[in-house]
């Protein structure tokens, strides 16, 4: 599962690479829709989201694991540099 907490957008995928691809698509769709309906400024203000015009020097990524031992999860872990720095 991939989650953008700021937008409340999430998606599921069998691998981290696919989850990253899908969450980027979901975020783009969410932001484009907000812009098309003229709600971006209001949504950002209500959710305390700030626009920045420079690329962050540090990326914050959180990984969550199921706490319930009856939940099945297959980890697909890739080195962070490979996941975050792909073009």
Image: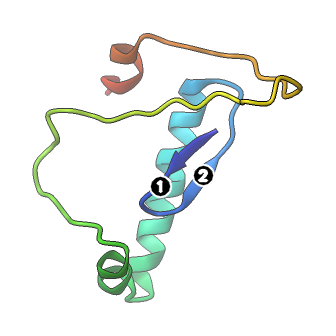
> 78 and 29: which one is in front?
78
**Colour approach in the figure:** rainbow
In the image, residue 33 sits, relative to residue 74, either above or below, namely below
Q: Which of marks 2 and 1 is nearer the N terminus?
A: 1
Badge 2: how crowded within 10 Å, few (<14), some, or many (20+)? some
Taking the spot 42% from the left edge, 70% from the top edge, the residue there is: 32
Q: In which quarter of the image is residue 41?
A: bottom left
Q: What element carries label 2?
A: strand
- Which mark lies nearer to you, 2 or 1? 1
Taking the spot 83% from the left edge, 23% from the top edge, the residue there is: 69
Which residue is farthest left? 54
Q: What element carries label 1?
A: loop
Estimate the x, y position of residue 49 in percent, counting from the top left.
29, 67
For the C terminus, the quadrant is: top left
Label 2 to label 1: alpha-carbon separation: 8 Å
Taking the spot 20% from the left edge, 64% from the top edge, the residue there is: 51
Estimate the x, y position of residue 53 in percent, counting from the top left.
11, 56
Which residue is farthest top? 79
> 16 and 45: which one is in front?
45
Q: Quadrant of residue 68?
A: top right
In the image, residue 57 sits, relative to residue 37, either above or below, namely above
Q: Name the residue under label 1.
A: 5
Labels 2 & 1 near each other (Cβ < 8 A): no
Estimate the x, y position of residue 57 in percent, counting from the top left.
14, 34
In the image, residue 21 sits, relative to residue 29, either above or below, namely above
So how many labels did they put on this image? 2
Q: Name the residue under label 2.
A: 10
Estimate the x, y position of residue 1 in percent, counting from the top left.
64, 38
Taking the spot 60% from the left edge, 52% from the top edge, the residue there is: 10
**53 lies left or right of 35:** left
**71 lies left or right of 42:** right
Badge 1: how crowded within 10 Å, few (<14), some, or many (20+)? few
């Amino acid at each position: 599962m991939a989650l953008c907490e700021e937008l409340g957008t999430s998606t599921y995928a069998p691998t981290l690479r696919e989850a990253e691809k899908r969450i980027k698509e979901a975020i783009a769709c969410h932001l484009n829709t907000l812009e098309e309906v003229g709600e971006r400024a209001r949504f950002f203000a209500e959710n305390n989201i700030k626009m920045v015009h420079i690329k962050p020097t540090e990326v914050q990524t959180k990984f969550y694991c199921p706490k319930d031992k009856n939940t099945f999860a297959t980890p697909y872990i890739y080195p962070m540099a490979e996941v975050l720095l792909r073009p």
